[in-house]
Amino acid sequence: QVQLVESGGGLVQAGGSLRLSCAPSGRSFSSYVMGWFRQAPGKEREFVAAMTWSGGSTWYGDFAKGRFTISRDNAKNMVVLQMNSLKPEDTAVYYCTADRAITVGGIRRPYDWAYWGQGTQVTVSS
């Protein structure tokens, strides 16, 4: 079965950077779309970024553009979310997600994604 395991979360000061990784397993993901969502206390789950496994297409939430980058680490077979210029409002649990049949319109809807990791906590202090 599909498993997604996130790592790299932690505590960072405002303006700093974190690199989150998602280790997928269970099958080939060559035909999948991979994504990241986040959820802060009292807020709905929010789209962060997504990419086709091939890297041919990427999508970003408005808050993430120019600060966050989604990519694949081919050597480690991981999906990476590089987060720079972090702000306290970026504090949330960050989730890796994957889907083989998701539509462009569904990318930003968390309930459209088939597979989810357990999440990793990111805390940005001021």
Image (spheres, helix red, strand yellow):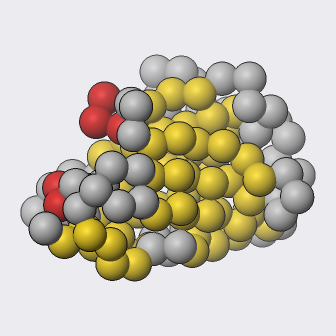
Q: Is residue 121 above or below residue 29?
A: below
Q: Is residue 125 above or below residue 86?
A: below
Where the C terminus falls, by quadrant? bottom left
Looking at the rendering, which quadrant does residue 96 occupy?
A: bottom right
77 displayed left or right of 121: right
- Residue 43 spot, x, y in % from top left: 15, 56
Looking at the rendering, which quadrant does residue 60 occupy?
A: top left
Residue at coordinates 19% horizontally, 71% vertically from top-left? 125
Residue at coordinates 53% horizontally, 41% vertically from top-left? 69
- Residue 105 spot, x, y in % from top left: 46, 21
5 displayed left or right of 107: right
Residue at coordinates 54% horizontally, 21% vertically from top-left? 104
Judged from this view, the residue extending furthest toward the bottom is: 10
- Residue 91 spot, x, y in % from top left: 24, 64
**In this view of the protein, can residue 107 be seen by the observer?**
yes
Q: Nearer the viewer, residue 95 or 20?
A: 20
Residue at coordinates 57% horizontally, 74% vertically from top-left? 7
- Residue 124 spot, x, y in % from top left: 25, 68
